[in-house]
Amino acid sequence: MAKLEQVGHSRLRKEGRAKVTGAAIYTDDATMPGLLHGATVRSQVARGRIKGIHFGEGIPWEDFVIVSAKDVPGENRVAMIVLDQPFLADTRVNHPEEAILLLAHADRVLLEKARAAVTVEIEEEPAVFTIEASLAAATVVWGEDNVFKKVSIRKGEVDAAWASATHVVEGTYGTGAQEQLYIEPHAVIAKVTAEEGVTVWGSLQCPYYVHKALKHLFNEPDDRIRVIQMETGGGFGGKEDYPSLISGHAALLSMKAGGRPVKILYDREEDMVATTKRHPSKTRVKTAFDADGKMLGLEMEFLLDGGAYVTLSPVVLSRGAIHAAGPYYWPAVAIEAKALATNCPPHGAFRGFGAPQSLFAIERHLDVAAARIGMDPVELRRKNLLRIGDVMATGQVVKEAVDLPGIMDRALEKLDYHGRKARYAGSNAGTDPIKRGVGFAVFMHGCGFTGGGEAYLASVAGVEGTADGKVRVLAASTEIGQGTNTMFSQVVAEVLRVPMDLVEVQQPDTKLVPNSGPTVASRTCMVVGKLVQDAAVGLKQIIIQAGLLREPYTADEFQAAVAAYVAAFGSLKAYSQYSTPPHIVWSDETYQGDAYGTYAWACYAADVAVDTRTCEVAVTDFVALQEVGRVINPTLAEGQIEGGVAQGIGYALWEKVEWRNGRMANAQMTNYIMATSADLPRLRVYFEENPNPMGPSGAKGIGELPMDGPGPAILNAIQDALGTDAPREIPLTPELLMDCLEARHV
Amino acid sequence: MSEKMALKLQVNGAERTVQAWPMARLLDVIREDLGLTGTKEGCGEGECGACSVFLNGKLVNSCLVPAVQCNGAKLETIEGVSPTSTDGAQLHPVQEAFLRCGGAQCGICTPGMVLAAVDLLKRCPDPDEEQVRDGLSGNLCRCTGYVKIIDSVLAAAKSASPDGAKAVAK
Amino acid sequence: MKGDAPACAVHTPATLGEALAFLAAHPDWRPLAGGTDLMVPFAAGRLPDFNFLNLDPLHELRGIELTNEHLTLGALTTYSEIRWHEGIRAAFPNLVQSAWVTGAAAIQNRGTIGGNLVNASPAADTPPSLLAYGAEVELRSTAGSRWVDYDAFHLGYKQTALASGELLTRIRVKRPVPGAFHFYRKVGTRKAQAIAKVCLAGYGRAENGRVAEFRAAFGAVAPVPKRALAAEALVLGRSAAEVDPDAVRAALAEDITPIDDIRSSAKYRRFVSERLFASMLKDFFAHLG
């Protein structure tokens, strides 16, 4: 690979200084003259018909701004995929945290008293809280059959596989809801005036999603809606779709308040009970193998609990279904996937977006199958891992040079998998109540939206020259901690061969930046980064063609040329728009074709210690090895993987949402258990580079990948430690592991 | 029903008096009355540590301290860790290490984490990794998996030692 | 923040005498120490009280006194003061351990041992260690002072032996015999910043190969922090060979009454309690040699 000046170097985080000094301004750090605070009155009932709203005594209601569904000027539906979720319920409610009424007041203490003084009378109706109950459809809570979306993926004749198989192994696997738990709760400020239209400042991932939602809500043209992203304290998918709802709420209050700005800030409990979580899943797997362990056929039923409204469930389902077969060559595949309605708050985006659920099922199942067949799980996988030229479940042909057996072997070597496995087999036979084991998972993660999705988005990003000769990146892609600002700057500085400090990144503001699409799906670096790179090349060509610059040039010459161009012509902007490369062909109707332009590939391996007295599992070592194209910034990239693995370990072992009639009962950081620094080992991250022509300087997406591997790797290690294949659900809390030990399968 | 009290504080070295309800949270006094928004609220129940500050030299969760118990106290917030830090001139060695080692991602836990690290290094100037993991266990970070935060603290400890000035740069 | 700060009144006495006099006149005012327990429900708008007696400035309630016979802790002694006290570390490892696992540094700097006992959470971390050490607590009012066995302090869920107008002022523990056995283990929701699912503390010593003193106490498996009296009785006075593990297990089943809640299940708490107790006994007899 060519030696690059910026790419591949750990440049300092662009906004890092502001963050370590506390100077960075997050939404709740901002205030405005005349600011009111907003609060939301919620249903508290899972399903029913609204009979009336009563305002209690002792509150000066005339001093409050009060908004209900009848105040909505445009469409009372959040514009997403299907227009089914209201901003404010008017006749009926479908989950316990549904917004019914909004209040605003300058005095936050009084506001809380007022919120408590409103009672909503609801006639309760039967509700559905589980995947099983939704599928049975004895009670229909959405559409005709509770099914939001179905996806079928077919390859070959799977029924023929059962007859010819030596081994048929079946299993059922489950994953729980998971809270994103960004440390900054949801916050937004809105100001709505007749002169300027609707302006929103918020903690959010996707400015143009909010823009679209507000457009429909207020029935206003594009240029009367403005969305500005503030510094954002983590998102992980949790600030993908929900900000549309909360921005709408704040904007409705501001409109009713005659243009006074309104801030809505959720406290931790409201954030946890009311906003989205990862979709719970149930997956039934049936697999056929020949006598040597060669895979013959895969049948899967993949079910997601979507919550009360469609929101993003169809796309989460899609990604889950496409990843469900894992990185293996299956001659025959039949995957049936469904996203189902329940009366929980809608489940939404969370890092991985369906893939962690289905990859957990297949990667956990392969260790169950290996034990049943009597094969080493490494050798079972080795016989079946995808190789160049192989055809995946959707018919996609593997064209990139991927070395999955090598990735697997190198990850296992880093962990000393074989050595430890042998040693633990000996030590576990003794009386020590601590049992140890090793396990791993091999997986891939599709970068960006599906082929069809990126074509639909047709994203645009740009760069502009500034009066002082710098280059400013124009994109709606947000910095939410993952390093967007720094990555864009490195990509632009590299292609223009100028220092990093000549590159700025415009704060995302829909008035100033084009729609580069949502900040999701591991697409910001690979897809938008490439657009920014191309736009920077375009900008350079403009000044060259204007005769202000000649190759080769120094940074000073470049800066002077940009400044001269801006002085002469007023502005210097260049844009680039995504168009699908001709070799990517995908059909959303048949689910056939090139699902993703490219994939990141990985093998993660875990070493665990299980205390059989308490059923507590400690992850004592963890290796995350991945092929990610090209690493733009090693420190940032490692940080992405380490953070994702930590979330994945929590997903596997501790992060359990306790549901009570569709409502999260443990909505406090004390009782929803994410890892502290004392709970994790030193996570070991390794990158392999294989530059990918689609991304800037060969980069792929990495944001979601680390979420996929820890769950199956850890449970496979627990199987190794305890000699039972019973653990098949995550989070595998000590309470659940205790039950598994009582009912050993092996 | 009570009355607001005149709350005297020495804030990052400067004498300040604000009017506060006795049971107001120190966190709200800092953010709203003193206008120092570097101190963050992540949970409001002493679990996440984003609101950490030094009160009379001791690390506390400012969301759990009522104003009435702060009168006459010495308060240090993230804005006071390095007197010239906000104008960009100079960072505290811990801040410098967080910047260089990738200890900050989304940044919302960072002010509290930096103060917890400063506190740890006061008690334990040359910690090993386990001591850092224990010392920071009251500050939750959702972005990093703690690896680079721990590296930052270890690097800061080295930079403060006579021969470790360059270690921060990793 | 849902706590109604403007509605709250706070009285800050200058001396303990003044505090007791005020409490005698206003027995329904709630004492406020380090705030780490009270501020949580207050800020969530879940505390029914609006009147607080601020004990924070009372120097009479601070201080650690360690003599050859006793350790005496002022009620406002913080977890940090306990955790980092060299003398306590050497003589009372369980107490140090229990302070160490209560929250993390910032909580330990504010939270007080007296507050922990009076808050009376069954899942608190320090009570089992104090029960195992056979602590006593001093309760004071304007009528005077009385020392009560800590074992008799917790009467029921969030119910204590504090009479109207009384404050818990000091905690006293006998210095353990050198070479005695100390055991403390918290099984929490995670390794730090955790609430206990089960907590077990033990203290014992032997004479002539038989157990001469033995106390074991649990947290989070009953409405109160609780001694395992029935199980203790089957260990006291016996040698290792004379202890019947099945009988101990059966006795333990009577000693504890765990429940299902959002943090764990009754079944799991029984499972762990049984195994931790057995593990502790194994260590105990190994320690005795």
Image (cartoon, rainbow, N blue to C red):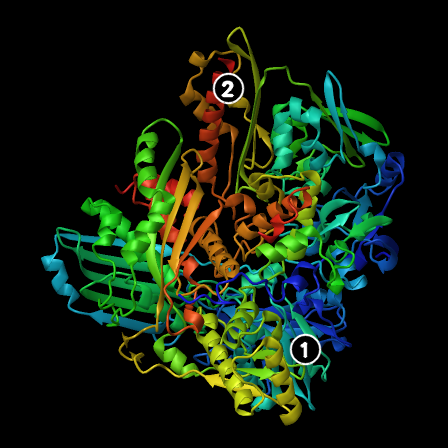
Quadrant the C terminus of chain A occupies? top left
Q: Is residue A39 left or right of residue A287?
A: right
Q: Residue most toward the left?
A: A164
Q: Residues within 10 Å of mark 1 (few under 14, many from 20)?
A: some
Q: Is residue A468 left or right of residue A122?
A: right
Residue under label 1, please give it: A66
Residue under label 2, please give it: C284
- Residue A615 lies, in percent from the top left, at 42, 38
Judging depth in this view, the residue of A689 and C271 nearest the camera is: A689
The image quarter containing residue A620 is top left
- Mark 2 to mark 1 CA distance (whole Å): 66 Å
Q: Nearer the viewer, mark 2 or mark 1?
A: 2
Element class at badge 1: strand
Rendered view: A456 above or below A138: below
Chain for disc number 1: A
- Residue B127 lies, in percent from the top left, at 62, 39
Task: Please name the amino acid that badge 1 sits on.
Answer: Ile
Judging depth in this view, the residue of C138 and A475 nearest the camera is: A475
> Residue B45: in sight, yes or no?
no
Rendered view: B97 above or below C230: below
> Residue A607: in sight, yes or no?
yes
Task: Please name the amino acid that badge 2 sits on.
Answer: Phe
- Residue A326 lies, in percent from the top left, at 29, 61
Rendered view: A73 above or below A45: below
Chain for disc number 2: C
